[in-house]
Image (cartoon, grey):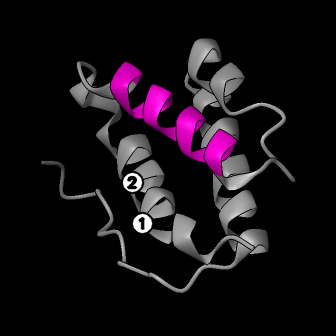
Amino acid sequence: MSMHEKTLKLVTNLDRTAIEAKLAKVRGAAQAKGLGELAQMLEGIEGAPRAQIERQIRIALKWLADKPEHKGLGAHLELVELNLPNLK
């Protein structure tokens, strides 16, 4: 683990706006790292029903599972996944 890695704060009270913002941030980070396939998995997720968001997050996490060099992106997706019950 690098000394420059940040600790992800566990937050479980994100609302839809915060969840969508977090997903947009992950999408942007994926694009910046040349992970177009991952970014595409998270496209058009804003305003989607909870089940669709949950499905896309699970697909993205599965895709990231064998890419430990991108575990930070996975951690952010896991945080969003924990907050999915808050979607209304």
Residue 41 sits in quarter: top right
Q: Is residue 83 above or below residue 14?
A: above
Q: Report the span colored magenta.
A: 51-63
| Magenta run includes residue 41 | no
What residue is shown at x 78% (from left), y 31% (from top)? 43
The image quadrant that residue 82 belongs to is bottom left
Q: Is there any visible trace of residue 30 in the rendered image?
A: yes
Tell me residue 28's x, y (percent).
70, 38
Q: Residues within 10 Å of mark 2 (few under 14, many from 20)?
A: some
x%, y% of residue 1?
12, 48
Instruction: Name the disc covering residue 82, or none.
Output: 1
In the rendered image, the vertical position of residue 41 relative to residue 52, given as above or below: above
Q: Is residue 60 magenta?
A: yes
Side (left or right) of 80 relative to 1: right
Q: Amino acid at mark 2?
A: Glu
Which residue is more in the foreground, 12 or 39?
Answer: 12
Picture coordinates of residue 8, whole percent (x, y) = 35, 69
Q: Is residue 34 visible?
A: no
Which residue sits at x=54%, y=86%? 13
Which label belongs to residue 16? none
Structural distance between the alpha carbons of marks 1 and 2: 6 Å
Closer to the observer: label 1 or label 2? 1
Q: Amino acid at mark 1?
A: Leu
| Residue for badge 2 | 78
Label 1–label 2 contact, CB within 8 A: yes
